[in-house]
C-alpha cells in the first residue's frame, strides 16, 4: 500500500515536466510546419511558373504538362550521366576496347562457339585476332538457325531475348541475335544524343509534343517461340512517354501501316503547337508528307468533324479510344485548309509555327530524302540525325546536331572495332587496324565484335575518319560495298554515283529528283536490248516527263567526267552508255512497300537499295516506266 502511494507520488511529480516537453515539441513542430508551408508553396509556385513558361500557352491540362515536365527532367538527368560516361570512355579507348572485348570473350568462352575458337586462351586483342578469322554472315547462318529452333549456349550463353531482322541493303534480310545488353547500349546512345540535342537546341526543352511517325512493327516467332522482329520498339512502350507524343497510345496498336501513318498525321495536324517531327529514317517522314499532300482534304475533314475517318480499317475498340481523344475543331480545319491550298513548300513550319526540329537519320541511303525534306516540305526547320546504328547494334552517335555534316563518334563500350583500309577490302583476310591506329581523312571498312554473338564481323560499311574526339575516332558514313556498280571492274560507289546523278539532274531543265535506283545489265536478261554491259537507271523526277536521248546521255557524260576508269572503259567500248528510264511519281513508294512485303522487314528499318540485286524488284520498277 505504501509502495503504491510512493509510486503515485513520483508519477504525479513527473507529469508536469513531461507535459512541458510535449508542449515544447508541439510548438517546434508547429514552427517547422509554419516554415515548411511557405517554402513548399514557393517551390510549387516556381514549378507552376516553369511549367507554364515552357508550355508557351499550349492548350493542355496542367497535369499533362506536369507529367511531361517531370519525365523530361528525369530523362535530362539520365542523359547527362550517359553523356558524361561517353565522354569518359573516349579518353582511354585502348584500355576500354580491351576491356569490352575481353568481357565478351570471357562471357562466351563456355558456349559451343567459344570452345571451338578457343576463347579460353584469349588474353588480349592480338591473341583474339590470331585465333578468330574475319567473318561475314554466311559464317553464322547455321548457328543462328539452330538457335531459332531452340538450341542454347551456341553463340551466347542461354538463348537470346529476340531475333532481329536486318534491313537487307546488302541482299536478302538476315536474322541476328538480340540481347538486352545491346538494347541497353542503344538506349545509352540515345541518351547522349538527347543531351546533345537540348544543348544545341534549348527550345526543345519546351513542353511541346513530338509527332512520331512510326509504322507498326511486324513480329512473328521462331520454331522455339523466340520473337522475331525489327530492331526497334514502340515509342509508347513506357506509359511515362505517352504525354510526350501527339498520337495517343491506342494509335500505336494499329497493325496496318497505311492506317497507322494516317492516324499519326491526323493527331499531329490537330496539335498546332508541335515541337518536333520524328521518324526512324528520313524516308519515313518524306513519304508521310507525300501522303499528306495526297490526302490533306480527307484529314482536314476528319479534324473538322472530330473523328477517325470511317473508311479506315481500324479495330472498333481502337477507333473508340481514338475518337474519345478527338473533338470537332472547325477553326483548326479551316486554318489547315488555307495553308494546304497555298502549296506544300515549307508546309511543316506553316502548319506547326512552333516547330523546332526534325529528328531523323538522313545519312547514307537516306541522304536524298533528307535533302528533299529540307529543300521542300521542311524548309527552314533544322534537322538532327542522331545515331549511326544497325541490326548489329549501336555504332556511333552524333554529338554535333547543329552541323550540316553527319559526323558520328564511335561508341567504345558498344562494340570492339577493327578497321580495314579501303585498298585492302577485296582481300578475304586483310590485316586490320585498331581504334588508336586509324588516321584522319582515310577510308576504312568497319569490322565489329558486338554483344550479340558476332565476332570480327565485316559490316560492309565504308567510313571516313574525319577527326578525333579525345582519343576516339569521329567517322562519316560513305557507302556500302554491296551498293557499288561494277560490270567491268570500274567500281563506282553509291556515294560517287549519287553525286554524279545530282550533277546530271541540274542539266535537265526543270527537273527535281525524288528517287532513283540502278541495275547492272547482267540482271536484265531479255529486257537488256543489247549485249553490251551497262547500267540501267530508273529515276522518279518532277518537272520533266519526256527527255530527248541527248538529255539522257548527259548522265553518261557526267559519269565519264567523274570517273577516269569508267571513261576508259567507255572509250574502249567495253561498257555501253547508261540508259535512263523515267518512272511515274509515287513509284518508289510502291517499290518500298513491295520490297517490305516480300522481305519480312519493317518500314521503320527499311533503306532503299540504290543498286537492285533481285530480279523481282527489277521487274516491279520496270512496270512503272513511263518514258
Image (cartoon, helix red, strand yellow):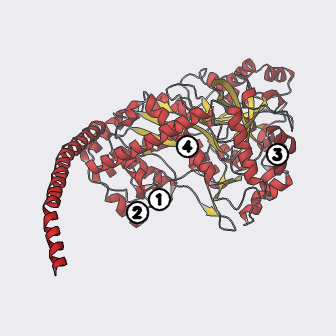
For label 1, the residue is 254
Give the crowd class for mark 1: few <14, some 14-19, many >=20 residues within 10 Å: many
For label 2, the residue is 318
- Relative to residue 37, is residue 354 drawn left or right? right
Instruction: First in sequence, mark 3 or 4: give its number.
Output: 3
| Tag 3 secondary structure | loop
In this rendered view, identify the residue nearer to me: 34 or 372: 34
Instruction: First in sequence, mark 4 or 2: give its number.
Output: 4
Q: Nearer the viewer, mark 2 or mark 3?
A: 3
Residue 494 percent coordinates (x, y): 70, 32
| Tag 4 secondary structure | helix
Q: Which of marks 1 and 3 is in front?
A: 3
Vertical comparison of 504 with 529: above or below: above
Q: Quadrant of the C terminus?
A: top right
Q: Residue furthest front?
A: 2
Q: Which of the 4 quarters of the picture holds residue 122? A: top right
Task: Answer yes or no: is residue 61 visible.
Answer: no
* Residue at figure coordinates x 72%, y 50% from the top left: 172
Give the crowd class for mark 2: few <14, some 14-19, many >=20 residues within 10 Å: some
For label 3, the residue is 122
Give the crowd class for mark 4: few <14, some 14-19, many >=20 residues within 10 Å: many
Residue 200 percent coordinates (x, y): 45, 28
Instruction: First in sequence, mark 2 or 3: give its number.
Output: 3
- Relative to residue 225, is residue 26 drawn left or right? left
| Tag 1 secondary structure | loop
For label 4, the residue is 188
Q: Which of the 4 quarters of the picture holds residue 362? A: top right
Amino acid at each position: 500500500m505504501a509502495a503504491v502511494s510512493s509510486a503515485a507520488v513520483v508519477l504525479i511529480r513527473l507529469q508536469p515536466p513531461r507535459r512541458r516537453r510535449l508542449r515544447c515539441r508541439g510548438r517546434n513542430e508547429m514552427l517547422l510546419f509554419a516554415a515548411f508551408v511557405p517554402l513548399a508553396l514557393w517551390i510549387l509556385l516556381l514549378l507552376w511558373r516553369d511549367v507554364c513558361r515552357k508550355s508557351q500557352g499550349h492548350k493542355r491540362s496542367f497535369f499533362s504538362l506536369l507529367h511531361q515536365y517531370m519525365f523530361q527532367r528525369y530523362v535530362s538527368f539520365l542523359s547527362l550521366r550517359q553523356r558524361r560516361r561517353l565522354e569518359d570512355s573516349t579518353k582511354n579507348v585502348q584500355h576500354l576496347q580491351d576491356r569490352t572485348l575481353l568481357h565478351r570473350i570471357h562471357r562466351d568462352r563456355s558456349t559451343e562457339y567459344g570452345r571451338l575458337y578457343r576463347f579460353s586462351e584469349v588474353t588480349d586483342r592480338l591473341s583474339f585476332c590470331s585465333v578468330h578469322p574475319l567473318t561475314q554472315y554466311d559464317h553464322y547462318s547455321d548457328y543462328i538457325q539452330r538457335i531459332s529452333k531452340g538450341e542454347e549456349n551456341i553463340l551466347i550463353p542461354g538463348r537470346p531475348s529476340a531475333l532481329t531482322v536486318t534491313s537487307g541493303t546488302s541482299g536478302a534480310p538476315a536474322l541476328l541475335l538480340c540481347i538486352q545488353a545491346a538494347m541497353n547500349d542503344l538506349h545509352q546512345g540515345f541518351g547522349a544524343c538527347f543531351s546533345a540535342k537540348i544543348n544545341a537546341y534549348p527550345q526543345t526543352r519546351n513542353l511541346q509534343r513530338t509527332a512520331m511517325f512510326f509504322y507498326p512493327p511486324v513480329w512473328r516467332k521462331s520454331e522455339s517461340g523466340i520473337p522475331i522482329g525489327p530492331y526497334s520498339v514502340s515509342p509508347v512502350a513506357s506509359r511515362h512517354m505517352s504525354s510526350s507524343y501527339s498520337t495517343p497510345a491506342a494509335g500505336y496498336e494499329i497493325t496496318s501501316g497505311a492506317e497507322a501513318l494516317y492516324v499519326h498525321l491526323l493527331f499531329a495536324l490537330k496539335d498546332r503547337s508541335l515541337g518536333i517531327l520524328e521518324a526512324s529514317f528520313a524516308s519515313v517522314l518524306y513519304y508521310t508528307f507525300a501522303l499528306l499532300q495526297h490526302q490533306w482534304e480527307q484529314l482536314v475533314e476528319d479534324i473538322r468533324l472530330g473523328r477517325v475517318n470511317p473508311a479506315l480499317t481500324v479495330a472498333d475498340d481502337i477507333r473508340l479510344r481514338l475518337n474519345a481523344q478527338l473533338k470537332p475543331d472547325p477553326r483548326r480545319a479551316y486554318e489547315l485548309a488555307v495553308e494546304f491550298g497555298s502549296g506544300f513548300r515549307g508546309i511543316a513550319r506553316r502548319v506547326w509555327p512552333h516547330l523546332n526540329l526534325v529528328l531523323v537519320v538522313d545519312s547514307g541511303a537516306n541522304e536524298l530524302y533528307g535533302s528533299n525534306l529540307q529543300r521542300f516540305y521542311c524548309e527552314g526547320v533544322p534537322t538532327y540525325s542522331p545515331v549511326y546504328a544497325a541490326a548489329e547494334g549501336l555504332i556511333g552517335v552524333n554529338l554535333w546536331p547543329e552541323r550540316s555534316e553527319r559526323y558520328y563518334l564511335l561508341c567504345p563500350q558498344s562494340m570492339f572495332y577493327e578497321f580495314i583500309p579501303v585498298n585492302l577490302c577485296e582481300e578475304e583476310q586483310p590485316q586490320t587496324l585498331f581504334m588508336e591506329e586509324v588516321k584522319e581523312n582515310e577510308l576504312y571498312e568497319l569490322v565489329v565484335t558486338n554483344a550479340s554473338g558476332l565476332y570480327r564481323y565485316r559490316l560492309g560499311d565504308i567510313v571516313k575518319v574525319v577527326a578525333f574526339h579525345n582519343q576516339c575516332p569521329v567517322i562519316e558514313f560513305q557507302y556500302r560495298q554491296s551498293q557499288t556498280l561494277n560490270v567491268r571492274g570500274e567500281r563506282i560507289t553509291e556515294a560517287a554515283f549519287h553525286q554524279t546523278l545530282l550533277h546530271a539532274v541540274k542539266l535537265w531543265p526543270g527537273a527535281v529528283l525524288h528517287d532513283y535506283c540502278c541495275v547492272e545489265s547482267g540482271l536484265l536478261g531479255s529486257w537488256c536490248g543489247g549485249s553490251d554491259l551497262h547500267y540501267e537507271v530508273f529515276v522518279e523526277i518532277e518537272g520533266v516527263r519526256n527527255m530527248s536521248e541527248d538529255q539522257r546521255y548527259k548522265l553518261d557524260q557526267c559519269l565519264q567526267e567523274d570517273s577516269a576508269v569508267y571513261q576508259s572503259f567507255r572509250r574502249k567500248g567495253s561498257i555501253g552508255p547508261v540508259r535512263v528510264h523515267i518512272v511515274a511519281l509515287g513509284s518508289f513508294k510502291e517499290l518500298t512497300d513491295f520490297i517490305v512485303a516480300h522481305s519480312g522487314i519493317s518500314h521503320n528499318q527499311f533503306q532503299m537499295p540504290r543498286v537492285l540485286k533481285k530480279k523481282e524488284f527489277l521487274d516491279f520498277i520496270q512496270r512503272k516506266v513511263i518514258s
